[in-house]
Image: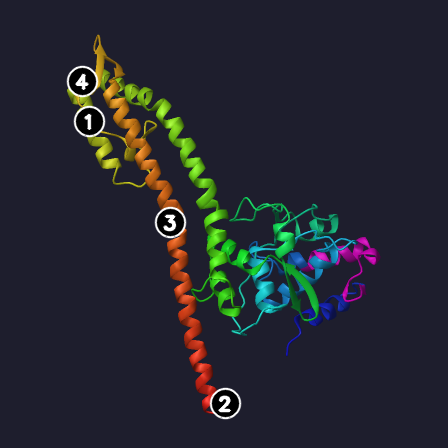
Amino acid sequence: MNNGMQEAVSYFESMGIPMKDGLLDVNALTEEKVERIKKWQRDTEQHGIMMTNMEDFYRSLLVAISVHPQKDSNGNINYLFGKGFGTEVALRGNVLGRTKHNTNPIYRSHSDFELYDAKVFMTRLFLEIFGTQEYFPPDRTKGLVNFEEGYMDSTYETVDVDGYKVLVPQLELLFADKFLRKEGTPRNGVYDCELLANEYDLNFDLIKEHVKEHGYETVKRPLQLAENRDRYKKCFERKILNQINSDLKELGNLQLSLKELNESFGILKEIKNGVAYGIKADMFIPLTESDVITSENMATALTEDYKTRTEDFVDKKTQEYIEELKMGPLTELDELIERVNASKEIDNKEQEEKKDYGEI
């Protein structure tokens, strides 16, 4: 069985890098030796991708936990490996206390680390070698928000990677995070979160809870939409009047101006998130002359009836978008869970058949 971490140790030893207790001996690293490690990192990087192959994944992991320990001297957590890199750690190692199915997924390159549950900033050596990386405080991840203080500390997982203890977030949390922030290059069309669920038996109810209660799209985005709604309700009259008066100067006729405005927004409604002149097409109600108050060939106000109808319509459309935001990820998650369960059912059946034929 290939031991990726031992190979990484041997690799750096061959470069003359001092080792201690299986890790890089940071206290014995001279500037010249740090430069060697930095050169290795630069030479193996391709178009911004740091870990293009499995060997460099293990080597990067070894360097990272050496120069930036995951726990301090008192055993308190400094950070966890999250998102794509954390998922790779779980796939390559064995999560303690979990049954692993050894599906042996192909390797996927990684462009960076994502440090979760971070209590301290990256060390000087870590920054020198890898540059600034994404790191998130204990209350959120890339795709999840509003965790209670101490939640990630109390639920983290320990992964045995060739004898090295590496820390990642709770697998259900890691799955939810990866589900909401999928990678751009899935492995043979299969995303990391699905691979994680194929490799380990996960609590899908807990995953749904994470997505529903902590997902950025289901928690933060609705608040943003509500704020946008309130701002729009305060300014839509001014923006509509500005455009009516602009058309009036050119056409000299209110009826023609309204006809052109209505037609323009009728076309814009076919475009997702269509906006013109600061007016949202999907929240625009076609105007008639009776909706506009004029004075000296200028539109000076919209009627109270039109404003009330628009405000009600804006409320309705915003609520529809909020419901869509909340339900969209959950619907997609249900579909993914069905796919995972179906895949595991097929694998289990194949295993039973092999047992029957004495192949295992």
- Which of disc 4 and disc 1 is earlier in sequence? 4
x then y, percent, for residue 116: 61, 51
x then y, percent, for residue 165: 69, 64
Using the image, tell me which numbered label, if any, was put on residue 260.
Answer: 1
- Which of disc 3 and disc 2 is earlier in sequence? 3
- Which of disc 3 and disc 4 is earlier in sequence? 4
Q: CA distance from mark 2 to mark 1?
A: 75 Å
Amino acid under disc 1: Glu
Number of the front mark, 4 or 3: 3
Q: Which residues are magenta?
A: 19-40
Label 2, on which residue?
359
Q: Mark 2 and mark 4 in contact (Cβ < 8 Å)?
A: no
223 over 196 or under it: above or below: above
Q: Secondary structure at mark 1?
A: helix
Label 3, on which residue?
327
Name which quarter of the figure residue 315 lies in: top left
Give me the residue at 31% from left, 31% from top: 314
Left/right of residue 15 with respect to residue 327 in the rendered view: right
Amino acid under disc 3: Met
Q: Is residue 274 visible?
A: no
Q: Characterize the local packing of mark 3: few (<14), some (14-19) or many (20 or more) Cα atoms within 10 angstroms.
A: some
295 over 167 or under it: above or below: above
Image quadrant containing the N terminus: bottom right
Q: CA distance from mark 4 to mark 3?
A: 43 Å
Query: Per the image, is 13 magenta?
Result: no
- Which of disc 1 and disc 3 is earlier in sequence? 1
Label 4, on which residue?
254
